[in-house]
Amino acid sequence: MSVRRKLTDYLPTVVPLSFLGAFVIYPVAAVILDGLVNGPGQTLPEVLSSSITLRTVSFTLLQSALSVALSLLLGVPGAFLISRLRFRGKALVRAAIVIPFVLPPIAVVVGFLRMLGSNGILDQLAMLLIGSPTSVLNLATGLPGIVLAHAFYNTPLVILMISASLEKLSPEVEESADILGASTIQKLRHIVLPHIAAALLSAAMLVFLFCFMSFPIILALGQEDYVTIEVEIWYAFRYFDYGKASSLALIQVCVTLSLASVYALSARKPAAQATHTLSIKTRGISELGLAEKVAVITYMAILTILVAGPIASIAYAAVYDPVSNQYTLRGLQNLLDPAPGGGLVALANSIFYSTMATVLSLALALPLAYARRSSKRRMSTLTSGMVLLPLGVSSITTAYGLLRMVAVPLGWNRNPWPIIVMAQTIIGLPFTTRSIENSLSAVSPDYLEQAESLGADRMQRLFFVEIPLLAPGIVVGGVFAFAMAIGEMSATLFIALPQNVTLAVATYGYLGVRKFVEAGAAALVIVIACIAAFITIERLSHGGSGGALSWSE
Amino acid sequence: MQREFDDGTRIGPIHLTIEDGEALCLLGPSGSGKTTTLRMVAGFIKPQGGRLTFDGVDMTDVPPRQRGIGMVFQSVALFPNMDVYRNIAFGPGIAGWEHPRVVDRVIELADMLEIRQLLRRRVREVSGGEAQRVALARALANEPRLLLLDEPLSSLDPQLADKLQSVIRHIQKKLRTTMIYVTHSQSEAFAVADKIAVLKDGVVSQVGTPDELYNNPASSFIAGFIGAGNTFVARVESEREGYSTVSFSGREFRVMGSSKKGASVSVMVRPQDVELSRSPMEGSFAASVQSVTPQMGSHRITVECDGTQLTAWIPDTELADTVGMQEPATVYVRFRPDSGRILG
């Protein structure tokens, strides 16, 4: 291969890889190392032997495991329903299932508190039922709240991953088992479960990873009594115990990166059962027995309460003040208040940072998507690892690294908005890259070869064939970047000075000072932006959320 | 049995009887309802009307797994998570056979189908033809009362399909298994079946042995579908002792079958019974050559006469070459004596 050819192959990926190197690997590694070596605060052996650490790590593992169990418990039946049941509006349900995943955690927290919290909708119903004057039910905070909120997020992911796997199971394989005398249970045991085992494992690992690193939900719903490693890092940084923060970050990175690499390896293994399926075996609702119908309806009801309830409650929270027991437009008016502490600055910041992050994401994601699809194995492995890196590194550690190792030396610490944009870009990058990569895979080399055979040169092929075919994917990637950026709270909360507050950060702030309608209104704006983004994605990618969630493929 | 689908497609009513140990083939073009009929027999599709009985016992509402049948799918549908041995042993295992009996049965079938060396292989490690043998062994392992095969050879290359055809026939005869075999290929149907039911638009057009279908097609559709027979409309001039004299293109000739004098009838003549010559023959009529297609050892020549196309298979290379070079040439056509037959 000529040097020039090599250069044109590698050059486009140098920029995004350097960016990730300079703004993820370097700051994270440097800040951890600095904390470990220079402190101040506890040393690594002290942290490792501390009972607090043991408690924190145990709780992190416990809540992750419980969240995985509940997500699987709720998600697996849903996957069967989605892949096996025929009903009206199935396409809509299938699309709507993804919505929780695109909603920012802090907005979900608002919905959860309003729906399941003390004096929330469910609590008020319960009080009415048993005639109690005081609150009787609070499922929104503590361990139940954390696990339910994680299930809210991850059940859709489980449904999507498992149903995708189920739909690949050839109906004729199941019919063969049928003909050979297998009962429903025997088919499930010998045929269906072995078929979805890999997808189940992938889903469980991914959900575990997300819950292990979850921050806003634990911070807001755990209310300082329930602390995970990520939240403990946040507190350690706030109390300038850099040694402890770095030690914990090191433990966390080791766990997440090993989980992430096991996940990546298992997802890469070609599925033995990836037979092409012509038709999926489905049944109409009318073909179900009475017991099955009752089970389906009960399941749908539970899922609706858990998933649709909190989303609808966000709108309710924007206009209903539980402190004064009144409906009010104060929250919405606050969004237009330009005074300090008002919502206008946050709104403007959110739009500006998210737009910047979108542009930056696209610039980075395009070459990365190309490289990930590269035929050169080393190149593709390297970029894959780099792209997935933000999923495995805590956003708090990234934010802290960016602040100390980038913002301070560059003098951006008085107004660190570029760092916020960078952090938001990094966190959404895996999703943006994945969407573009997905639409790239739809561009068959045949089209390009056809264009070449018709006399198109390289530029003409790029502009007249490839880019028009890629355009919807690029827009989807951009919309994903915007949605992730506008909802990002963890890193932004860490970096933002008062003038940099975004809607997500403001929502958390309002909750802390019991300004519930203000929090509700801010959350509602983010939710509307995310749902609008989601609808755009669905429209452009004709369902399937741009494939950005199909990590197992 | 019959069934109507939401999209308006209708299958049936289908009346068929299969004797013990008989191999019945459902033959028809795609969309004729063969596979649906087979799936109704298997129990995957419920008929809306009619009954299915095995040895006089009503099976219409019995679930597939209790029908005691074996089935080979077009896609093979081997269980990807099991090796070849476990695929074959699956049915007997589910049925609760004793382990030694399962092993004996698997080995017996593996020997019969020449796949013993594959027993420990993963499913994805066997070739297409081997996979079909495994699927056949799996379907037979439970000693089914009825074996169903849904276009089992359609994804294999012709040589392999030919070979497996005779394997299937041999095993069916040896085990005396009652079998229903679905295919769209006439040659496959002739190779495996004792009896063939030709399906068209969801109903049975004709049932008979391969000979009966070939020699006595009930309609021009069957005549054309089996053996590529030529059919054309002729007028009956006279009738005597099971033979009729008909006129076509100004010539009269004798055909089998009787009909009223003056009636218009469909007459079928096989391509190999059509004679062509460059000079007039006794009783021949003129036609123009439309196309000449070389076949293995013969030429397929299509001619047109009075708006009717006739196909001839001519093993005469010289004639075909000459005709081909002079296209559109005029040739003279006649039918071998008594080779025509009145249809329907």
Image (cartoon, helix red, strand yellow):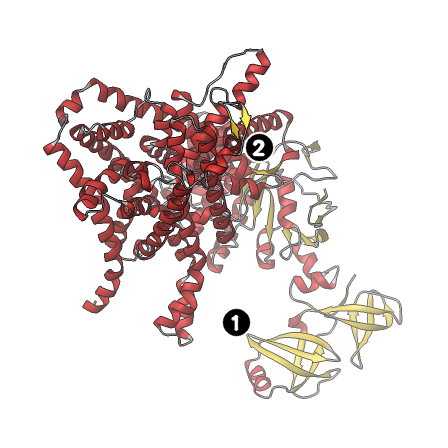
The chain under label 2 reads B
Whether residue A462 is visible here, answered yes or no, is yes
Give x and y (percent) for residue B278.
65, 87
Relative to B178, A381 lies left or right: left
Q: Residue at x 39, y 70 (%)?
A: A461
Is A442 drawn above or below residue B240 in the view shown? above
The chain under label 1 reads B
Screen quadrant of the C terminus of chain B: bottom right
Q: Is mark 2 on a helix, strand or loop?
A: helix
Give x and y (percent) for residue A366.
34, 56
Label placed on residue B296: 1
Whether residue A194 is visible here, answered yes or no, is no
Point out the frontmost of discs 1 and 2: 2
Relative to A216, B109 lies left or right: right
Q: Mark 2, residues whose alpha carbon is within 10 Å: few (<14), some, or many (≥20)?
A: many
Label placed on residue B65: 2
The residue closer to the viewer here, A290 or A322, is: A322
Q: What element carries label 1?
A: loop
Relative to A31, B51 lies left or right: right
Give x and y (percent) for residue A112.
46, 28
